Image: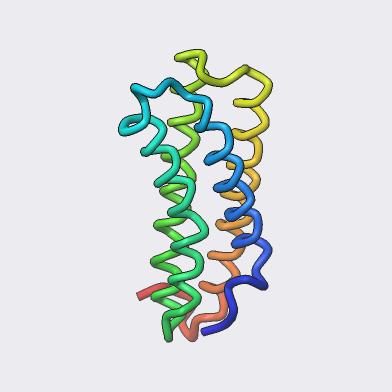
Amino acid sequence: MFDFRKLRIWQEGQELTLAIYRITRHFPKEELFGLTSQMRRAAASIPHNIAEGCGRQSAPDLLRFLTIAMGSASELASQLLLAQGLEYLPTETAEQLLSDVEKLRRMLTAYYQKVKANLPDGRAS
C-alpha cells in the first residue's frame, strides 16, 4: 500500500526493538533461548507486522497486521515485567520501556481506528 518507513509508528517500533536488543545483551546466558529470545521476537514483531500490513493491498489486511502488532506489544510488556521481577532490569529501565510500549500501543490503536474509519462500511472484514 505505501512505504512503511514513513510511518511514525514503524519508526517508534524499530527504535523500541533496537532498545530491547541492546538491553537483553546483558541478560544471563541461560536466558539466551528463553526470555532473551522471546523478548526480541515480540519486540521485532511490532515493526515487522506494521511493515507487512503496509505491503498488503487492502485495508482489512493492514488492520489484521496492526492487530498482531498490538498483541506483540502486550506480550512484550508482560515479558518486561517478568525481566524486572527476575531483576534482569533495573526498575527505572523497565518503567521507561513499559512507558515506551504503552505509547506505541496507543499509537497503534489510533492508527487502527483511522484506517478502520476509512473503510467503506467502517468495519474490518
Q: Position of residue 55 (x, y in %)?
A: 46, 79
Q: Position of residue 48 (x, y in %)?
A: 46, 62
Q: Position of residue 56 (x, y in %)?
A: 42, 80
Q: Is residue 114 above or below residue 27?
A: below
In the rendered view, does 14 fall on the left or right side of 37? right
What's the coloring here? rainbow
Query: What residue occupies the far left of the structure in this picture?
Result: 33
Q: How many marks?
A: 0
In what quadrant of the picture does the C terminus appear? bottom left
Q: Position of residue 22 (x, y in %)?
A: 58, 37
Q: Nearer the viewer, residue 95 or 60?
A: 95
Q: Is residue 69 above or below residue 34?
A: below
Q: Is residue 71 above or below residue 80?
A: below
Q: Is residue 57 above or below residue 90?
A: below
Instruction: Please report the residue visible at 50 percent of the width from the left and 81 percent of the height from the top.
Output: 119
Instruction: Please report the residue visible at 59 percent of the width from the left and 79 percent of the height from the top.
Output: 3
Q: Nearer the viewer, residue 100 or 88?
A: 88
- Asked where in the image residue 64 lies, by quadrant, the reply is bottom left
Q: Nearer the viewer, residue 122 or 93?
A: 93
Instruction: Please report the residue visible at 62 percent of the width from the left and 17 percent of the height from the top.
Output: 90
